Amino acid sequence: MIIAIDGPAASGKGTLARKLAAHYRLPHLDTGLLYRGTASAMAAAGKPLDDAQAAATLARALDPATLDEAALRGRPMGEAASVVAAHPQVRAALLDLQRAFAARPGGAVLDGRDIGTVICPDADVKLFVTASAEERALRRTRELVGRGEDADPAAILEDIRRRDERDSGRSAAPLVRAADAVLLDTTALDVERSFEAALAIVEAARRRA
Ligand code: DC
């Protein structure tokens, strides 16, 4: 079973993907990390983010096993990832790796922005997870404060809106709900309720298959 999960920044899609993967004992790929890893490699190589060719070369050389999630998680890297992710060459460079992951025997859970539309258009289940920008900013703020980091709620909201605009407005594989994706709005749901709702969507799809 392939479960494709898409949605905007801080919508809760990563948490749901991890929980669904654990529940069904499937491998999980957080595809945002690939773009974050590419952005980080660009910074390490001293390349400007608009150098699409250099970004594609570094994306192709990426080894997902060596990506340090904790180091790539921060806000600046999310912003830089969103910039390199708009280059079609970078998306093409990361395509085979993602499709190969999805083709593992038994299936997989992938989360990102274009999983249901481009990477796995034939996924068994597609979820489009969203929440209001205000709620997503609140969650990010709480997460940062919980880690003892500084958090400016207004700046975080602005950041989320900018990222939404860039990810949805780009011409290469924009963030858009696939026609056959089920919408899950988690604005008023906590993690447990969101998971229950996601599970119900997956189970309904399994019954139909
Ligand atoms: O999910 P995330 O916040 O870790 O993703 C970081 C950026 O990477 C996001 O703003 C857009 C880009 N991205 C993408 O374009 N396509 C994906 N499948 C995953 C992430």
Image (cartoon, helix red, strand yellow):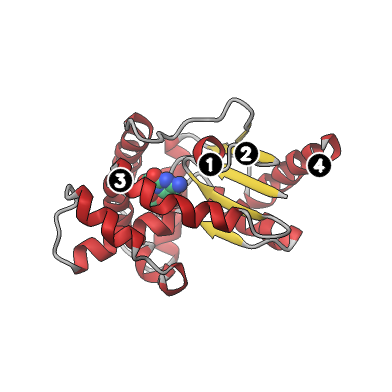
Q: Is mark 1 on a helix, strand or loop?
A: strand
Kindly report which numbered mark, 4 or 2, lies closer to the viewer in this rendering.
Answer: 4
- For image coordinates 65% across by 56% down, the residue present is 108
Amino acid at pointer 2 = Leu
Q: Does the residue tagged 1 have its C-beta within 8 Å of any atom of ligand 1? A: yes
- The residue that mark 2 highlights is 127
Query: Does label 1 or label 2 sit earlier along the sequence?
Result: 1
The picture quadrant where one finds residue 160 is: top left
* Foreground residue among 167 and 209: 209
Amino acid at pointer 4 = Arg
Query: Quick one: which residue is furthest to the right in this view?
Result: 207
Q: Residues within 10 Å of mark 1 (few under 14, many from 20)?
A: many
Task: Check residue 166 in the rendering and tell me which mark sits there, or answer none.
Answer: none
Task: Check residue 206 in the rendering and tell me which mark sits there, or answer none.
Answer: 4
- The residue that mark 1 highlights is 6
Q: What element carries label 4?
A: helix
The picture quadrant where one finds residue 74 is: bottom left
Cα–Cα gap, marks 4 and 1: 19 Å
Query: Does label 3 or label 4 sit earlier along the sequence?
Result: 3
Is 37 located above or below residue 182 in the figure? below
Q: What element carries label 3?
A: helix
Regarding residue 76, the answer to whether it shows in the image is no
Q: Residues within 10 Å of mark 3 (few under 14, many from 20)?
A: some
Asked whether the residues under the numbered discs 1 and 3 touch, taking CB atoms below 8 Å apart as contact, a structural biologist would say no
Cα–Cα gap, marks 4 and 2: 13 Å
Please state the horizontal and vertical placement of residue 87, each as a whole percent of the image: 28, 43
